Image (cartoon, rainbow, N blue to C red):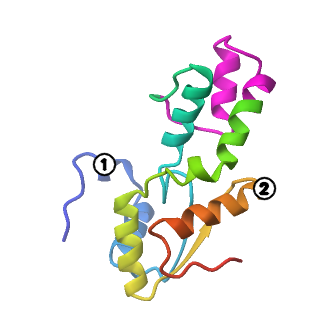
Amino acid sequence: MTEWPGGFVETLSNKQICTLRDLFEFRIKRINWDFDQILVDSEVPVKEKFYIDTGINYRDKKIDQWLALSHWAEKDGYMSFEEAKEIEAPIWEDPEVISLAKPIREMQTYSQKAAERGVIQTIVTTRVSKLREVTFQSLEKGQFKQDLRRL
């Protein structure tokens, strides 16, 4: 049996512990993955491009909502939300930027092992519909090709 990180297991309910064990042992036969920050580290190239375009450095902050950079830029007094949105939104739509997102290796490894064991995997995302194509382009370019189907 694998050891859990110290202190982590104490924060979980029994149901959460059982779910993690079932995932670890591939007993759950269908998994729905999110794209951003689960399969790929998409916020890194987005924050970098926003910095290049604006000079505003949010590279050390964790994106926690849609258009977070725009919300922060307004809150910090750099520009209005609308001005920042005009810069940030197209970055999320840019295939060249999103294709720079690195796969999260641990998730890639788990996904490949799950696929080998017959686990059905679906990628779901809260990305707005106009980002659908750039999401698929990124997945097709990246390491999550094993059974990619457009739904």
**Tag on residue 81?**
none
Q: Nearer the viewer, residue 22 or 52?
A: 52
Quarter of the view holding residue 150:
bottom right
Q: Nearer the viewer, residue 8 or 136?
A: 136
Residue 101 in the image: x percent, y percent?
49, 51
Magenta span covers which residues?
A: 61-85
Rendered position, 72 above or below 25: above
Quarter of the view holding residue 73:
top right
Q: Which residue is mark 1?
A: 8
Q: Is residue 39 magenta?
A: no
Q: Which residue is mark 2?
A: 130
The residue that appears at 44% across and 89% down in the rendered structure is 118
Q: Which quadrant would the C terminus be assigned to in this image?
A: bottom right
Number of marks: 2
The residue that appears at 51% across and 34% down in the rendered structure is 48
Mark 1, secondary structure of its residue = loop
Mark 2, secondary structure of its residue = helix
Residue 128 in the image: x percent, y percent?
75, 53
Residue 85 in the image: x percent, y percent?
75, 31
Q: Which is in the foreground here, disc 2 or disc 1? A: 2
The residue that appears at 66% across and 45% down in the rendered structure is 92
Q: Is 129 positioned to the left or the right of 69 in the image?
A: right
Residue type, label 2: Lys
Residue at the extreme bottom of the image, as rendered? 118
Rendered position, 71 above or below 46: above
The residue that appears at 63% across and 29% down in the rendered structure is 69
Residue type, label 1: Phe
Q: Residues within 10 Å of mark 1 (few under 14, many from 20)?
A: few
Q: Nearer the viewer, residue 143 or 75?
A: 143
Q: Residues within 10 Å of mark 2 (few under 14, many from 20)?
A: few
Q: Which quadrant would the N terminus be assigned to in this image?
A: bottom left
